[in-house]
C-alpha cells in the first residue's frame, strides 16, 4: 500500500471525513490569505477550534455519560457482588436483568462510552491526515508546491536525483514518494517536497535551479537573500517553520546561536505534554470501587493519563512542528471546553435527571409488558380456535357417515348395506356407519 500524501485519502469513512475537514481547512486558509496573513500555523489553530466546536455535542454527551456512570457504578458493583459466586444460568440471567434495569434507570447504554469513542476515532485519524497532508487539501499550498514539482519533472535529471541523493532526501523518497513509481509523478514529487526539511529543500532547489521560480501571479516560491518566498511565508509561525521538526530546529538554531528559535522549538513538545496533562486533570475522576480503592480499569486509565503526555512530548520532537502545534491547540481548546462543561454540570440536578430517566424506563417497561400480554392473548385465542376446529371435525364424523349413506345412490347404498361388518376396522368410518345403522334400525322398530 502506497503512502501517498498528496492524493486524498480513499479509505472508507476516514477518507470521506478527511475530504470534509479538508474543505474546512481550505476555507480557513483562503480567508487568511484574503486578509493578508496566509499562515499554516494560524490556520491549524483556527481549524482545531472549529473542529472541536463541531465535536462539542459528542463531548458533552460523553461527559454526561461519565457523570451518570459515576453515580450508577456503586449499584452495578453491588449487583456484581451479589452474584459473585453464582455461575448457574438462572443466576447469571437474573444478574444481567438487574444490571439492565440499573442502566435503564439512569438512562444510559452499556456501550454508550464506546459508541462515542468509535465516532470520534475516525475524526481524529482524518484530522491527522489533513494536518500532515496540507498540499493535498489546501489548494493554494498544493499549487505552490506543484510549481516546484513541474520544474523538477521537466529537468533533464528528473526524479533520479531525488532517488539517489542519499541521506534524508533519499529516505524521504522511499517513504513518501511511492506515487513517483506508481505513475503519478507530480504528486509523488510534491509528497517528497512537503516532507523535506528546510536544509534538504534548499539542497534540492540548488540542484534543480528552483530559486527564481514564481507562480502565475509573479510571487516567488522559495526565499532568497532579499525576498521571502511563499513556502516560507506559509510555514513561518512566530519564527518557527511548521514543516521542520523541533529537534531539527533546535540543532540548527543552536549552531548559529538563535536562542529564540531554540526556546520556541522546545516549547512545542513541552506545551504539548503540559496541556494534555491539564486536560486529563479536568476530565471526570476515575470511578472508585465499592471498597473505596481504584478499580483496575481506573488504575490503567491513571497510568495512561501520565504516560500519554510524556509520549506526545517525545513524538513532537521528531514530527513536524505543525503537528505539535495542532496537539497543543487541541489540548488547550479541550481544556477550555472541559471547564465550561464542568461548570454546566455542577449546576445540573443529576438526581432529577435520574428520576426522569426512571420514569421513562418504567413507562417503557409497562408498554413492553402490555405488548407481551397482548401477544399471549392472541396466542391463546389461536390455540383455542385450533382446538375447536379439531373437536368439530371429530364430532361430525358419525353424522357425516350417516349423511353419506342417505345421500348415496340406491345401488351404492345396497352395496354398502351388504358389506360384511367383519371387514370394517374398529374406529374406521365404516365401523362408525355400521353403529349408526344399527342404532337407527333398533329405534325405528
Image (spheres, helix red, strand yellow):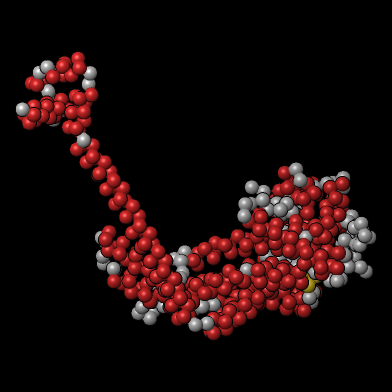
At horizontal 60% and vertical 70% (from top left) the residue drawn is 57
Residue 320 appears in the figure: yes
The quadrant the C terminus occupies is: top left
User: Residue 235: x, y in percent?
Assistant: 79, 67
Say which quarter of the image contains residue 222: bottom right
Residue 307 appears in the figure: no
- Name the one closer to the observer, 380 or 153: 380
Query: Would you say 154 lies left or right of 292 here?
Result: right
User: Residue 233: x, y in percent?
Assistant: 84, 68
- Name the one closer to the observer, 385 or 263: 385
User: Residue 108: x, y in percent?
Assistant: 46, 69
Query: Would you say 228 lies left or right of 407 here?
Result: right
At horizontal 83% and vertical 56% (from top left) the residue drawn is 143
User: Residue 406: x, y in percent?
Assistant: 20, 25
* Residue that sits furthest to the front in the current view: 445
- Name the one closer to the observer, 262 or 270: 270
Say which quarter of the image contains residue 21: bottom right
Amino acid at each position: 500500500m502506497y503512502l501517498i500524501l498528496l492524493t486524498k485519502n480513499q479509505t472508507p469513512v476516514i477518507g470521506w471525513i478527511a475530504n470534509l475537514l479538508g474543505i474546512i481547512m481550505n476555507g480557513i486558509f483562503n480567508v487568511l490569505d484574503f486578509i493578508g496573513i496566509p499562515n499554516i500555523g494560524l490556520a491549524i489553530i483556527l481549524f482545531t477550534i472549529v473542529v472541536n466546536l463541531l465535536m462539542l455535542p459528542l463531548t458533552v454527551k460523553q461527559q454526561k455519560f461519565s457523570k451518570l456512570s459515576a453515580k450508577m457504578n456503586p449499584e452495578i458493583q453491588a449487583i456484581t457482588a451479589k452474584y459473585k459466586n453464582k455461575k448457574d444460568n438462572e443466576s447469571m440471567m437474573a444478574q444481567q436483568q438487574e444490571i439492565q434495569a440499573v442502566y435503564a434507570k439512569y438512562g444510559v447504554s452499556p456501550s454508550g462510552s464506546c459508541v462515542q469513542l468509535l465516532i470520534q476515532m475516525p475524526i481524529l485519524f482524518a484530522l491527522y491526515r489533513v494536518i500532515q497532508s496540507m498540499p493535498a487539501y489546501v489548494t493554494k499550498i498544493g499549487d505552490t508546491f506543484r510549481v516546484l514539482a513541474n520544474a523538477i519533472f521537466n529537468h533533464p535529471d528528473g526524479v533520479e536525483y531525488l532517488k539517489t541523493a542519499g541521506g534524508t532526501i533519499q529516505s524521504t523518497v522511499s517513504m513518501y514518494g511511492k506515487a513517483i513509481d506508481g505513475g503519478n509523478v507530480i504528486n509523488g514529487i510534491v509528497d517528497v517536497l512537503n516532507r523535506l526539511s528546510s536544509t534538504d529543500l534548499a539542497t534540492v532547489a540548488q540542484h534543480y535551479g528552483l530559486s527564481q521560480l514564481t507562480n502565475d501571479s509573479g510571487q516567488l516560491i522559495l526565499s532568497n537573500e532579499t525576498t521571502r518566498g511563499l513556502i516560507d511565508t506559509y510555514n513561518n509561525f512566530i519564527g518557527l517553520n511548521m514543516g521542520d521538526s523541533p529537534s531539527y530546529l533546535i540543532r540548527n538554531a543552536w549552531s548559529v546561536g538563535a536562542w529564540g528559535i531554540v526556546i520556541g522549538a522546545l516549547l512545542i513538545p513541552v506545551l504539548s505534554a503540559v496541556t494534555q496533562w491539564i486536560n486529563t486533570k479536568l476530565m471526570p475522576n476515575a470511578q472508585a470501587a465499592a471498597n473505596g480503592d481504584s478499580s483496575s480499569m481506573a488504575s490503567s486509565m491513571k497510568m495512561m493519563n501520565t504516560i500519554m503526555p510524556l509520549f506526545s512530548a517525545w513524538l513532537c520532537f521528531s514530527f513536524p512542528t505543525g503537528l505539535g502545534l495542532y496537539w497543543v491547540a487541541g489540548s488547550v481548546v479541550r481544556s477550555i471546553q472541559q471547564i465550561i462543561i464542568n461548570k454546566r454540570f455542577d449546576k445540573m440536578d443529576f438526581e432529577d435527571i435520574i428520576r426522569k430517566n426512571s420514569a421513562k424506563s418504567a413507562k417503557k417497561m409497562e408498554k413492553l409488558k402490555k405488548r407481551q400480554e397482548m401477544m399471549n392473548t392472541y396466542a391463546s385465542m389461536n390455540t383455542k380456535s385450533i382446538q375447536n376446529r379439531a373437536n368439530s371435525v371429530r364430532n361430525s364424523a358419525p353424522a357425516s357417515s350417516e349423511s353419506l349413506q342417505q345421500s348415496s345412490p340406491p345401488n351404492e347404498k345396497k352395496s354398502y348395506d351388504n358389506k360384511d361388518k367383519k371387514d370394517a376396522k374398529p374406529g374406521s368410518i365404516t365401523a362408525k356407519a355400521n353403529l349408526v345403522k344399527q342404532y337407527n334400525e333398533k329405534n325405528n322398530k
